[in-house]
Amino acid sequence: MTVAPQHDALSASAIHSTDQALNHVIIEFYEKLSSWEHAIVRDKGFSLSQVHTIELLGVHGAMRMKELADKIGVTTGTLTVQIDKMVESQWVMRRPHETDRRSILVELTEKGQALFLEHDALHLQLTTDLTAKMSAEERSLLLNLLTRMNQEF
Amino acid sequence: MTVAPQHDALSASAIHSTDQALNHVIIEFYEKLSSWEHAIVRDKGFSLSQVHTIELLGVHGAMRMKELADKIGVTTGTLTVQIDKMVESQWVMRRPHETDRRSILVELTEKGQALFLEHDALHLQLTTDLTAKMSAEERSLLLNLLTRMNQEF
DNA sequence: GCATTTTAGTTTGAAAATCAAAATATATAA
DNA sequence: TTATATATTTTGATTTTCAAACTAAAATGC
């Protein structure tokens, strides 16, 4: 590989040399996590989408339908029927938005919160296993780097 | 005077102090990536599952049906009909396994390879954006840490 | 070798998830 | 005030998915 001259137009959004490797490691990590989650979820009898909802509400707290639909990646129509079922199973509840009367807030019930904690514990165990061979410094470095990536998202 | 006893049972699988934070950052990263992928995919008219297949075959090369089904997280029955459609659209092709006559290998066609490269480029741009503010050292450190996590999976 | 069990993949029919579009209600802008 | 935009629900059709039955080949036990 030849050393390229500095191109100002490019350097602003330059593709760094490790980025392609980094990209594939991220894709692989995503695929593995996705597969792990799928397996966990199937065992418990939930759909992947339902567990995403539980996770999102557990991490972020109450959320509007639209917001939740965007984060999960489905239409609001799809979400309405999904939330209907989850309300029936008593994992979540609907609550009117304080200021916007068009909006509905969805939040975890106590039962839903318990489910979140149970699922979160599985994630924690996975995280612990995956980072078991790292030093404390490496773990907090990883935390720092991932936090910064999330902020840029 | 005795020194406080080591708790062997615990120390073997100790939950480190940053792990809960790390866990939630990972979950958040996964949710964001999942949402991003969902949006990309719907724009192009593919299903999430189809794109996962393209990604997996693009990164890993030809794979048996069973292997692919396990990685995606669906039954082989589901995969059979999905691959049928993808064969019809000429993104993938089936090829007999060299030594195991029960098995079928699935691999990308040229058209499928092109689709993978196109999708991969979007991922690369995302990766570049997310790590834009990091130094070269930080990026290679991140690469190192994520690679090690993938190995433990 | 031969019978039994396991594994890989396909087919099928029913159940579940999803979408787009239409409908309703509220908020915002002109 | 009127027009436009946003949030949610409903509906009907399409697509995805699963479980179970089925075929074929490999692995195991004797």
Image (cartoon, coloured by chain):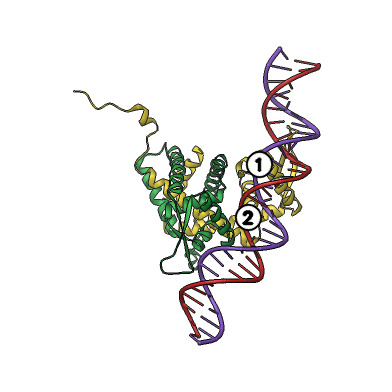
Chain colours: A green, B yellow, C red, D purple
Q: Nearer the viewer, mark 2 or mark 1?
A: 1
Residue at 47 percent across and 43 percent down: it is A119
Number of numbered labels in the structure image: 2
Callout 1: SS: loop
Q: Is residue A104 left or right of residue A39?
A: left
Estimate the spatial distance between the alpha carbons at disc 2 and disc 1, rounded to whole Å: 27 Å
- Position of residue B83 measured from the top left corner of the image (x, y, whole percent): 71, 47
Which residue has dot 1 on it?
B75
* Chain letter belonging to callout 1: B
Q: Note whether C10 is above or below A87 in the view shown.
A: above
Specify the amino acid type for callout 2.
Answer: Leu
- Position of residue A120 measured from the top left corner of the image (x, y, whole percent): 44, 44
* Chain letter belonging to callout 2: B
Question: Along the line of sight, which residue is nearer the eye, D4 or B108?
Answer: D4
- Position of residue C30 measured from the top left corner of the image (x, y, whole percent): 50, 85
Residue at 53 percent across and 48 percent down: it is A30
Specify the amino acid type for callout 1.
Answer: Thr
Q: Report whether mark 2 lies on the same chain as mark 1.
A: yes
Residue B69, quarter of picture: top right
Question: Badge 2, how many Cα within 10 Å: few under 14, some, many 20+?
Answer: some
Callout 2: SS: helix
Question: Along the line of sight, which residue is nearer the eye, A137 or A39?
Answer: A39
- Position of residue B152 measured from the top left corner of the image (x, y, whole percent): 49, 37
Question: Badge 1, how many Cα within 10 Å: few under 14, some, many 20+?
Answer: few
Question: Along the line of sight, which residue is nearer the eye, D13 or B123?
Answer: D13
Residue at 48 percent across and 67 percent down: it is A8
Q: Is residue A17 visible?
A: no
- Sooner in the amino-acid sequence: mark 2 or mark 1: 1
Which residue has dot 2 on it?
B117
